[in-house]
């Protein structure tokens, strides 16, 4: 692996500080470099820049990377509540991955489709897709973590909050074993939501979400900041006696969401505005 690819992979998956000069080099590099750059740009909430880089890769000669690029675009659409738009990209990713039967690409596409399905209430379809992805997800730590997220989210959508805790815990543990700080922060957000929904008398959910918010803000992973702030707000029982208070956390979520939307492409902004999953923010902060 070249030094550039190693640096890009460290930023994309292992929490290395984001270096804009390295991203600029990656954006003009080979297909793997461009994919890793697109992943990092998405983590920053720079969805327009990520889309401009990843969209042309759908016809890349390397079918695996073409599939991974499509799955990444699908993930970015889904992060802003655009599950219908995400499904289009995840379906393309699955078709490409099936041509070469690559485990990582197949798992990414199947899990993306499972997340798309559960968000619109197609729980049986989502369950089937998660099951199909399970054996393939185990071949890569990153996809195994994603399998844990979607399994937890499916349990939550099915009204089985207690069953969501274990896969979220496993994803958080595996993230830390692989020194994947961004995945750990996302896992902690999923776990915080599961604990809040299942009942959390010792306040662990709030601590996890606030820590994830602090980590994401410091690292510049703005795509995670507004969900972390909302998870922390939901885990805060009242405004008195807790710092930061529920209202402060919701204001923080609003500020981060607006930041992300300003850096999104028109389609991403449109799906966010229409999505029932993205909070409607009446006033844009200056």
Image (spheres, rainbow, N blue to C red):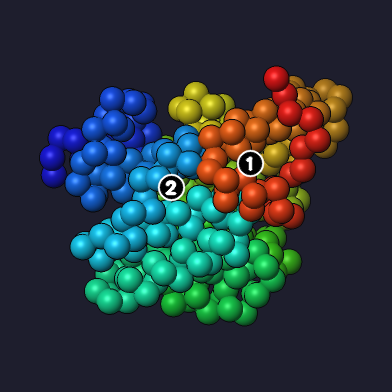
Farthest top residue in view: 286
Mark nearest the camera among 1 and 2 is 2
Residue at 71% of width from left, 53% of height from top? 274
For label 2, the SS is helix
Residue 63 x, y percent position in the rendering = 25, 66
Residue 149 x, y percent position in the rendering = 53, 57
Q: How many marks?
A: 2
Residue 32 x, y percent position in the rendering = 24, 49
Distance from disc 1 to disc 2, alpha carbons, whole Å, reads: 21 Å
Residue 176, quarter of picture: top left
Specify few, some or many for label 1: CA neighbours under 10 Å numbering under 14, 14-19, or 20 or more: many
Residue at 13% of width from left, 40% of height from top? 2
Describe residue 199's horizontal placement relative to residue 28 as left or right: right
Q: Compared with residue 179, is residue 247 higher up or lower down, i.e. above or below?
A: above
Residue, disc 2: 51
Residue at 73% of width from left, 28% of height from top? 284
Mark sitting earlier along the chain (1/2): 2
Q: Which mark is residue 227?
A: 1
Specify few, some or many for label 2: CA neighbours under 10 Å numbering under 14, 14-19, or 20 or more: many
Residue 20 x, y percent position in the rendering = 34, 26
Describe residue 254's horizontal placement relative to residue 134 as left or right: right
Describe residue 272's horizontal placement relative to residue 2 as left or right: right
Q: Compared with residue 237, is residue 54 higher up or lower down, i.e. above or below?
A: below
Q: Compared with residue 158, is residue 274 higher up or lower down, i.e. above or below?
A: above
Name the image quarter holding the C terminus: top right
Foreground pick, 97 / 60: 60
Residue 102, quarter of picture: bottom left
Residue at 43% of width from left, 47% of height from top? 51
């Amino acid at each position: 692996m070249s030094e550039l690819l190693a640096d890009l992979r460290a930023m994309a998956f292992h929490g290395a500080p984001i270096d804009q000069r390295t991203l600029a080099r990656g954006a003009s590099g080979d297909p793997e470099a461009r994919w890793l750059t697109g992943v990092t740009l998405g983590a920053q909430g720079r969805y327009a820049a990520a889309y401009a880089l990843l969209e042309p890769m759908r016809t890349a000669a390397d079918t695996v990377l073409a599939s991974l690029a499509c799955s990444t675009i699908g993930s970015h659409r889904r992060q802003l509540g655009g599950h219908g738009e995400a499904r289009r990209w995840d379906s393309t990713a699955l078709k490409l991955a099936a041509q070469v039967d690559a485990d990582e690409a197949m798992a990414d596409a199947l899990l993306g489709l499972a997340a798309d399905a559960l968000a619109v209430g197609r729980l049986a379809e989502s369950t089937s897709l998660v099951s199909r992805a399970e054996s393939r997800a185990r071949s890569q730590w990153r996809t195994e973590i994603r399998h844990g997220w979607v399994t937890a989210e499916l349990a939550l959508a099915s009204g089985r909050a207690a069953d969501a805790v274990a896969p979220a815990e496993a994803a958080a543990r595996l993230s830390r074993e692989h020194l994947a700080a961004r995945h750990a922060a996302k896992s902690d957000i999923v776990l915080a939501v599961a604990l809040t929904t299942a009942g959390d008398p010792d306040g662990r959910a709030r601590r996890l979400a606030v820590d994830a918010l602090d980590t994401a803000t410091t690292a510049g992973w703005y795509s995670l900041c507004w969900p972390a702030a909302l998870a922390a707000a939901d885990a805060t029982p009242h405004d008195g006696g807790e710092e930061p208070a529920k209202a402060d956390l919701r204001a923080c979520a609003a500020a981060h969401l607006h930041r992300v939307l300003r850096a999104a492409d028109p389609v991403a902004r449109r799906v966010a505005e229409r999505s029932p999953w993205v909070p409607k923010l009446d006033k844009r902060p200056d």
